Amino acid sequence: MFRNQYDTDVTTWSPTGRLFQVEYAMEAVKQGSAAIGLRSRSHVVLACVNKAQSELSSHQKKIFKVDDHIGVAIAGLTADGRVLSRYMRSEAINHSFTYESPLPVGRLVVHLADKAQVCTQRSWKRPYGVGLLVGGLDESGAHLYYNCPSGNYFEYQAFAIGSRSQAAKTYLERRFESFGDASREDLIKDAILAVRETLQGETLKSSLCTVSVLGVGEPFHFLDQETIQKVIDTFEKVAEDEEGEAGEGDAEAAAAPAEQGGGGAGDQDVAPMEM
Amino acid sequence: LPVWFSINADYFFLQFTIPIDNGDSVKTAEADSQRTLYPYVTGTSIVAIKYKDGVLMASDMGGSYGSTLRYKNIERMKAIGKHSLLGASGEISDFQEILRYLDELVLNDNMWDDGNSLGPKEVHNYLTRVMYNRRNKFNPLWNTLVLGGVKNGESYLGMVSMIGVSFEDNHVATGFGNHLARPILRDEWHADLSFEDGVKLLEKCMRVLLYRDRSAINKLQIAKITEEGVTVSQPYSLKTFWEFKAFNNPTAGAEGSW
């Protein structure tokens, strides 16, 4: 995208019917570090890469508990993400208080999307620069949604957002058909494997990722380092064994980064605001 | 609007004060006419029990105007959404207002069209919030509400009073029903009552109320709610017996001129 005379205001249309400021906001999501979500009929797993500004600092929190039955992972301007998480927590608790019943996640994401839309239609506002992967339960089971700065939302079986998310998406596209009936453990394994795809060759360690789970009968919680490392150990060992055979998985993993080569170079510098 | 004004001779200016609604709950005499002080047209007891397939609820069709039994065709039980049944005693106009609130609630719930629906627990809690908040503003809805329902195979029966006291139980009653019907239910209710036994039990309670509650009339309805939905029966009367020996010539032992 190049600068043009229609991109100053969010309330200015381009002659081709585009709102550039909204599209630029979606670019901010692509700059943030990766977040991944996948779901089965009864569980949702949200995982993200822990990137710290520097070796001296700690990594930013990108996954938030909204309620016992809803969690959200963000990518983009984390400050905007925190504010929206606070809004979601507020909606969830108000519903809980009035009806003594959990807010269905499908209704929460609509509220969230409508809130984001407002910022695309006021000249004195700017769109939220964060993408949200919202995972939660309602009467029909587990759901995963992606909320966009544009005010759109989509339901997914599995999705990844942020930088180098294409690698994770390619992996998820291969595997998503098995997610519906997958066990909780398999779902967690697939999430961590998807995170590994975004690291592009960097060794996967439990300190590099955050994983959270929620499901029917299982309130939202984070997995501790030990548990994550155990899962990593199960497939890292297998990968070592396959090294000599030049297995199918390896070849595809090599192909994915190659496709991303052009985009990857541009992503080297992570702008200070986003993580 | 009454206006008070005073002229301060020293400074020579006029001060006007007008009572405005600034959120204070205690108001002047005029504002009193805008909040509930006492009920006018009232319904008497509701009795409800859980049974095998759901919940059974009984009420008569009377609307009293003080001591006059003025209205004899008031339906005091209504279906709410797919899963709930609401019965009310107390001020009938306040009950109608509550039905309007719930109508809006159910409408918005249906408009989502997303496979989620309000169950009896949600409706009961919503009503508790409404009743309690009105009580805090010293402007209550003068009702005691009974909320019963079935959702996903689970029966629910609860009650909310005009001051926001709220609870669930296997059998509930309002007004006189608490004193006359509940003792019977405590002795004779048990889990998994059949429909016939449940109706018999409710009729037993309603008969006692008919004999002893002077605001009761002999025209009642029984409503049932199960997983399939709500059915409210046609109005009917209970058989009564007035020939107990003790009530024949009641003043036999102490005759008087009045």
Image: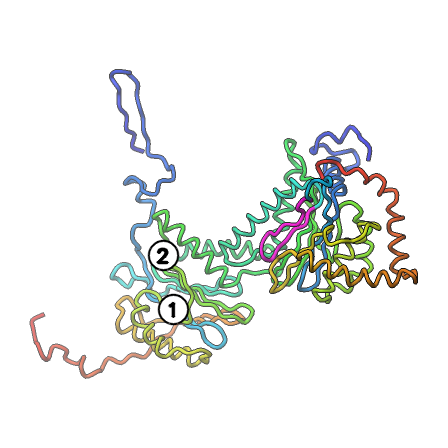
Tell me, yes or no, if residue B234 can be seen here: no
Label 2 sits on a secondary structure element that is: loop
Residue B100 in percent (x, y) is at 46, 54
Q: Is residue A66 magenta?
A: yes
In the figure, residue B214 lies in which quadrant? bottom left
Q: Mark 2 lies on which chain?
A: B
User: Which residue range is magenta in the image?
Assistant: A59-74
Task: Please name the residue shown 77% across and 38% down the image.
Answer: A270
- Spatial CA distance of label 1 from label 2 is 15 Å
Mark carried by residue B162: 2
Q: Judge from the rendering whether residue A129 lies leftward or rightward of residue B28; answer left or right.
A: right
State which quarter of the image contains the C terminus of chain A: top right
Badge 2 amino acid: Met
Which one is nearer the viewer's eye here, B201 or A7?
A: A7
From the image, tell me which residue sits under label 1. Answer: B172
Q: Which chain carries label 1?
A: B
Considering only vertical position in the picture, is B233 above or below A253? below
Task: Please name the residue shown 44% across and 54% down the image.
Answer: B129
Badge 1 amino acid: Val
Packing grade of label 2 (10 A; few <14, some 14-19, many >=20) is: many
Packing grade of label 1 (10 A; few <14, some 14-19, many >=20) is: many
Q: Judge from the rendering whether residue A44 lies leftward or rightward of residue A263; answer left or right.
A: left
Q: Judge from the rendering whether residue A256 lies leftward or rightward of residue A78; answer left or right.
A: right
Q: What secondary structure characterizes most of the magenta part?
A: strand
Tell me, yes or no, if residue A31 can be seen here: yes
